[in-house]
Image (tube, rainbow, N blue to C red):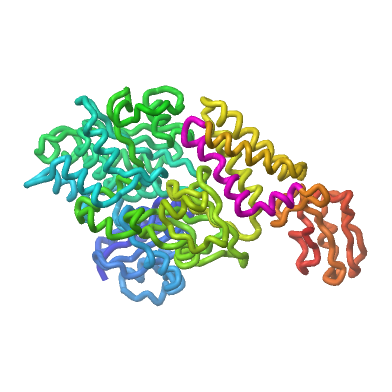
């Protein structure tokens, strides 16, 4: 058998040990010329990392999962012989393979397949053919490129869902010869890693999409604003830019067309507010990242107050495919209001977590249970957080909600950049709302009073409720503050910060009421430590004394082989007894 072995080395794979697997395979193949060893990016199956793929030429013959360096010998033997029996325990199951089989990949089309460090690998997969289509031969005018994007219905994938063609056209029509194209790669949502995966796994598709956009709006300089917490993404993008520049794909007179455009990278400090386009521009200019009043919009006065266009990584990752295949092909997928595909980072209490790209129009149930495999650990589905700190929690009653901008908006959540955090019945929704408010309060730039002070006050109320000190009046006060902040904040961070609170109040109000019940404050999910009490079921207790031994304050009494008891006045609610009991005798009340 001739071919090659590919090791997935995105950040998630490396964190799981893929670099060590690669090193072990490299050692075994050091004197072999018939089997090559390659690096590929993230295929998106995070729960199975490290992942190694065996290829016969360009045909995938086996995908191996949970690989360790100790498996190197038998992997090389299997690659040489074509006999997979010796690595049968590593081969992915049909059930797990369905994770990819149920997806439609456009933005992620090359992720986990090509070598992200190789321009040749990218070009073999069709890279820069769309750029050649618009710049060489009969070519396409900038207006024709914009019209193709218009036909596709591509909306900005950074969260707002604004029509991409409209932003491009506004920048093109803006007077002035000096214009800028900016990529927003400042991916700040907790649990989101779509943009990082694209840059790490297929940086040339981002570059090509940006070059096409720069041609369309008339920009000669393109800037990628990426958070500094993505060192591997920055490293691979820097290398890809250098390769493209050396090949004449970046710089002056690209492909002999007369079109010129250069690239640079700006590493941001990781401020969540810099996901807002005008705050990002301020940061690019060397100022503190704080939003500007709009209008004027960036298309009229953006970077250095010149016409500028900003889209995120996923938006640009779709562009080359659309130009190559036509806008109508992209528009044929999705719903009437939301065209094409969308990438989600599926995380939380789900069996199969990772990157998911689906056509708009699938339901939450399709993704969480069909692709994600349902809830792990034996719990039941409770909610899914869509859109990160700017989004909202969608309850189990809305599991059949269609995934598009309009339908998700009607639930009180948003599409956002694509975070999808799944929660089971062990999750306290009040604590979840507090988690996101903690985040947005800390990330507020402080420019406007509503966001700077309002999010802090909401955070304080939620902290009080979770600590068992809340009162019924806190619920109404919380709602009042949410509406005031939403209506009065200057930018999208403050305007959407109340969403996680408003949606949890909308769908899980009973949990807030239970937490603030003056007669018996309790956490229905048994998650808030301050509201827990522990007791022993005498019928189940075997008197093994393990719980008493684990108790750090001696609050558990009893003799061997006799039921024990917990002194609730001495108990500090640490949960050690609950974790230690093997018979289910310790109960959370």
**Quadrant that contains the N terminus:** bottom left
Q: Nearer the viewer, residue 110 or 372?
A: 372
- Where residue 299 appears, as percent x and y from the top left, is 30, 31
Left or right: 482 with respect to 461? left
- The location of residue 523, given as percent across then percent down, is 73, 53
Residue 268 point in image, percent of width and height: 42, 32
**501 inside magenta stretch:** yes
The quadrant of the image that shows the C terminus is bottom right
Describe residue 172's horizontal placement relative to residue 552 as left or right.
left
State the image coordinates of residue 7 (x, y, percent, origin top left): 37, 58
Residue at the (63%, 41%) spot, across then down: 479
> Can residue 56 be seen by looking at this rendering?
yes
Query: Magenta stretch?
Result: 489-516
Vertical position of residue 90 compared to residue 229: above or below? below
Residue 496 covered by magenta stretch: yes
Using the rendered view, name the quadrant where residue 106 is placed.
bottom left
Name the residue rendered at 84%, 66% in the picture.
537
Residue 68 visible in image: no
Q: How many marks?
A: 0
Q: Main secondary structure of the magenta part?
A: helix
The residue lying toward the viewer, choosing from 540 and 506, is 506
In this rendering, the answer to whether 479 lies above or below 573 is: above
Question: What residue lies at 72% left-to-right and 43% top-to-bottom?
Answer: 465
- Single out the residue that lies furthest toward the left: 137
Residue 565 is drawn in which quadrant? bottom right
Which residue is found at the position 47% from the left and 33% from the top? 491
The vertical placement of 175 against 503, above or below, is: above
């Amino acid at each position: 058998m001739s071919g090659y072995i590919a090791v997935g080395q995105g950040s998630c794979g490396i964190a799981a040990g893929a670099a060590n697997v690669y090193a072990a395979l490299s050692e075994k193949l050091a004197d072999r010329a018939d089997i090559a060893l390659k690096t590929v990016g993230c295929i998106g199956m995070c729960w199975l990392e490290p992942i190694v793929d065996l290829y016969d030429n360009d045909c995938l013959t086996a995908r191996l999962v949970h690989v360790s360096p100790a498996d190197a010998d038998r992997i090389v033997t299997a690659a040489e012989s074509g006999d997979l029996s010796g690595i049968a325990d590593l081969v992915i199951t049909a059930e797990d393979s369905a994770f990819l089989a149920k997806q439609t990949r456009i933005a992620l089309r090359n992720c986990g397949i090509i070598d992200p460090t190789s321009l040749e690998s990218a070009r073999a997969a069709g890279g820069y053919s769309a750029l050649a289509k618009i710049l060489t031969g009969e070519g396409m005018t900038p207006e024709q490129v914009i019209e193709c994007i218009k036909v596709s219905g591509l909306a900005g994938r950074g969260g707002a869902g604004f029509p991409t063609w409209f932003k491009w056209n506004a920048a093109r029509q803006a007077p002035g010869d000096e214009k800028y194209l900016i990529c927003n790669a400042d991916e700040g949502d907790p649990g989101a890693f779509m943009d990082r995966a694209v840059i790490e796994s297929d940086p040339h598709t981002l570059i090509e999409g940006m070059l096409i956009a720069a041609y369309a709006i008339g920009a000669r300089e393109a800037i990628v604003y990426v958070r500094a917490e993505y060192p591997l993404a920055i490293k691979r993008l820097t290398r890809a830019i250098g390769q493209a520049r050396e090949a004449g794909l970046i710089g002056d007179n690209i492909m002999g067309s007369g079109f010129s455009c250069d690239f640079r990278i700006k590493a941001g400090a990781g401020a969540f507010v810099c996901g807002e386009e005008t705050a990002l521009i301020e940061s690019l200019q060397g100022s503190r990242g704080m939003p500007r009043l709009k209008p004027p919009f960036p298309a009229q006065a953006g970077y250095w107050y010149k016409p500028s266009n900003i889209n995120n990584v996923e938006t640009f990752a779709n562009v080359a495919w659309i130009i190559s295949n036509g806008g109508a092909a992209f528009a044929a997928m999705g719903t009437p209001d939301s065209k094409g595909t969308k990438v989600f980072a599926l995380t939380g209490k789900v069996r199969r977590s990772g990157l998911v790209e689906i056509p708009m129009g699938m339901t939450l149930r399709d993704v969480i249970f069909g692709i994600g495999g349902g809830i792990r650990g034996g719990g039941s589905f409770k909610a899914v957080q869509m859109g990160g700190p700017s989004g909202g929690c969608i309850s189990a009653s809305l599991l059949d909600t269609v995934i598009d901008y309009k339908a998700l908006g009607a639930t009180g959540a948003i599409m956002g950049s694509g975070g999808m955090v799944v929660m089971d019945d062990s999750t306290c929704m009040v604590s979840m709302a507090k988690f996101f408010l903690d985040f947005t309060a800390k990330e507020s730039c402080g420019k406007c009073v509503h966001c700077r002070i309002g999010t802090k006050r909401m955070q304080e109320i939620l902290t009080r409720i979770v600590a068992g000190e809340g009162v019924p009046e806190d619920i109404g006060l919380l709602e009042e503050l949410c509406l005031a902040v939403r209506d009065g904040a200057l930018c999208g961070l403050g305007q959407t910060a109340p969403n996680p609170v408003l949606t949890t109040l909308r769908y899980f109000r009973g949990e807030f009421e239970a937490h603030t019940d003056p007669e018996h404050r309790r956490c229905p999910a048994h998650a808030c430590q301050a509201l827990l009490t522990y007791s022993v079921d005498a019928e189940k207790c075997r008197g093994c004394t393990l719980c008493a031994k684990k108790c750090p304050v001696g609050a558990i009494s009893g003799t061997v082989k006799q039921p024990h008891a917990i002194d609730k006045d001495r108990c500090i609610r640490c949960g050690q007894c609950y974790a230690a009991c093997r018979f289910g005798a310790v109960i959370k009340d």
